[in-house]
Amino acid sequence: MEVNATFDLIVVGAGPAGSSAAIVAARRGMKVLLLEAGRFPRHKVCGEFVSSEAVDVLHYVVPDRIESLLAVPRIARARIHSHGRFVEMPVSPAAYSIPRITLDEELWNAAQRCGVTCRFETVREVKPSNLTFSVETTHAEYDATSVINASGRWSRLSRRIPSNDSWIGLKAHFAAETDDAVDLYFTGGGYCGIQAVSPGVLNACALVRQGTAKTLQDVLQSDEHLANRSRDWRPLTEVFATAPVHLGPGSPISDGMLQVGDAAGFVDPFIGDGISLALRSGVLAGRCVGEVPADQYARIYQAAFSGIFRSTGQVRRLMRMARPLRPALLQLFRAPGVAGQIFSRTRHSQIDVLQAPIG
């Protein structure tokens, strides 16, 4: 076992948040270790909707690979379905559909090109000690001045308060007819998002309350119109699942570690801003680590993103309206500018994480 290799920063978790944090910190001259428990390439449970806000950050993080990353379907429309009715609205600027199996590997490779030490190791424990941290993995022990936790919403490092309102995430890819829209089907148990990830290939990603569905097929059958639409779909991947999922904000710091991505808070997936929030929080932490104290990072994080969590919670409550009231909600979305105003409040951080002064 390698003992006491020393770094300025250790990042635990190499999803969009962790990799972007490692890249930004390495560009600042820090000696960075990025640890990932899994292997790339691999699928993750994700709607794979990449908003224009996320694309701005990708230009900042991986400018040399942006043309390749964005050679994917554009999402120019959104259709919200509920019990046989739907409303269509434009997505402007148009979003992108980037599979996580591609995005995560690209960011991992970009971190290596920036000089980050990247290793596939599972973290067993992070121990604060005076002004440093000791990180024990399955293969080694490392010391670092700072640690960023990007290990997700429910790892041994991301201690969250359990909630009675817990959810299950399910995802698979299917061969099917595709277009330039993302379709959101809302049922009593949750929702299912459908969009193209390449010509003739759809991503179906569902978030349902525990106890309302056991399989993705159960979700597809929970709405008559979705059941009819999916009848001839041909599976291209296995079904991937994640649980438990607890929605809402967490904490941007824990035991002196900066937290990013889902470790800091899990935004409602149907808003389509999860990847953007992960990237932006990773960039923010990469700019702050070693520059400002952890509590100041927490204040900047809250100033930047608390409005997003508050607004998505409000939209979630709207979507939980009783079935007889849902036609009125869809009619509200049809009003000029209303849907855009509602969803813009779930997208825009109050601080430009790419340019705003940190100190």
Image (spheres, grey):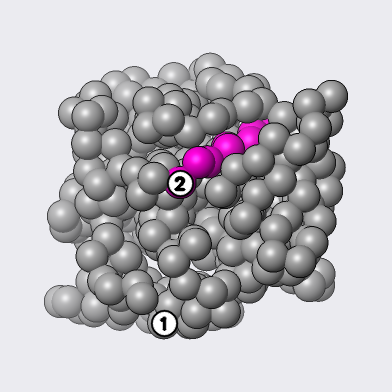
Residue range highlighted in magenta? 30-38
Q: Which residue occupies 49% across, 62% down?
A: 290
Residue topped by disc 2: 30
Left or right, residue 248 beside residue 316: right
Neighbor class of circle 1 (other Cα within 10 Å; few <14, some 14-19, many 20+) is few
Q: How many marks?
A: 2
Left or right, residue 211 beside residue 249: right
* Residue 188 image point, x, y percent: 63, 64
Q: Does the magenta stretch include residue 238?
A: no
Q: In which quarter of the image is residue 227?
A: top right
Q: What is the number of the mark on residue 303? A: 1
| Identity, as a three-letter code, of the amino acid under mark 2 | Met
Q: Quadrant of residue 127?
A: bottom right
Gap in angstroms between the C-alphas marked 2 and 1: 26 Å
Left or right, residue 188 beside residue 90: right
Q: Which residue occupies 35% across, 72% down?
A: 358
Comparing 115 with 35, the one in front is 115
**Quadrant, the C terminus:** bottom left
| Identity, as a three-letter code, of the amino acid under mark 1 | Ala
Q: N-terminal of the two: label 2 or label 1?
A: 2
Comparing 339 with 98, the one in front is 98
Residue 99 vertical placement versus 23 (above, below): above
